[in-house]
Structures are given as C-alpha cells and as structure tokens.
Image: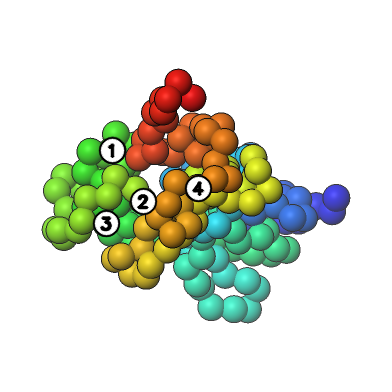
Amino acid sequence: MSEIKLEIDGKEITGEEGQSVLEAASENGIKIPTHCYHEKYEPTGSCRLCLVEVRVQGGRPELKAACTYPVQENLVVKTKTKEILKTRRLTAELMLARCPESQAVREIAEEFGVKKPRFSLKNLNCTLCGLCVKACETAKGESAITFAGRGTNRKIIAPFELSPKECEGCGACAAVCPTSAIKMVNIEEE
Ligand code: FES
C-alpha cells in the first residue's frame, strides 16, 4: 500500500492509500467527532458531525465529511475552524431536537455547548445515522429495514411498515444503534 503525505491541523502526517481523513487523523492522535461512523461498516457520511475543511493543492477550501473523504497527496486539512465548529454545533442542535432523550446525543450536544435546541422537531429518538441498516445488510446480505420519506419525514422502517419476514431477530441493528431507538422484545417466546 503506498504512503500519502498530508497535513492535518498544521501537522505533517503519513496516511495510506484508501484511508479516509478520519482514519488517518485518528491514527495520528487527532480527534474528530463522529456519530454515524463505525469501524465495522462502510461509512455513509450521513450525520455530518465529522465535517472538516479540506484543500487539495491549488484548490479552494471545502467542507467534507472526514469519514468518507479519502487522503490525498499534499492535502491540507483543518479540523477546528470557526466555520466547522459553528456547523457542528448546528448539527448537534438538530440532533438534540430530534432525540432529546438519547444519552449519546445529549453528550454530543454538551460537547458543542448546546443546552436547549432552538427548533422543535418530531421526537423520533433516531438521528438517521443508518448504522442499523448497514448492520442488517452486513448480517444478512440484504436489509430488513430501510430509509423512507424525505426531509423532516425521513425515517427508518421495515419495508411497507410491516413486520419484515427477512428479520431473524439477530439484534445486530439494536446493538449498533447509538440512540437505543431499536429495542429487542420477546414475541411468543422467540
Ligand atoms: Fe462522518 Fe457521521 S461520522 S458523517
């Protein structure tokens, strides 16, 4: 695997081809906050909490999700600009508006100084991180749960909102859910 030289927060580091900025940063002790990332699954970049500023040589700075953005030669990354912190704070605020009871989300909100969200959203106890869908796909090869709807109506459901026959009750979705929105229950001794 070839080595790639890049800079994160003024520190010159060496990454590996195929690595994401998040992985390279974490290997070099640079912490970037995450929520929907899980090392077991392909990242989807859905929560946007790991946004960083990236500048490819000669290019303009852009905000990208560190968990999905690949390391590149001479890439310059900043993880804590004013704009980044403002964007992460807003993301944390939206998460808290949707999941006021989730411990994981409360901790994120606290980290970014959000006490009370300015918005009122339907309490779904779900941040739509998509980890449950990934976990189900990985466990079964196809997912018994999926995303549905758009915008504020977006949610995760079983297809047609029926009890999915593909579900074997393996619990992979519940185990990975960061907000504990998915619960396992016993039905007829199963
Ligand atoms: Fe990267 Fe969620 S952790 S977008």
Q: Which residue is drawn at 27% across and 50% down?
A: 124
Q: Distance between the residues labelled 2 and 4?
A: 22 Å
* N-terminal-most mark, 2 or 4: 2
Q: How far apart are labels 4 and 1 at the CA level?
A: 26 Å
Disc 3/disc 4 C-alpha distance (Å): 30 Å
- Amino acid identity at mark 1: Ser
**Viewer can see residue 12:** no
Type of amino acid at the residue the image marks with label 3: Leu
Mark nearest the camera among 1 and 3 is 1
Q: Mark 3 — residue?
A: 94
Provide residue 138's location: percent of width, then percent of height.
Answer: 65, 44
- Mark positioned earlier in the residue sequence (4 or 1): 1
**Callout 2 amino acid:** Thr
Mark 2, secondary structure of its residue = loop
Q: Position of residue 59 (x, y in %)?
A: 59, 78
Tell me the residue that label 4 is attached to: 164
Q: What is the x, y in percent for residue 35?
A: 44, 46
Judged by depth in the image, the label closer to the viewer, 4 or 1, is 4
Q: Which residue corresponds to mark 1?
A: 102
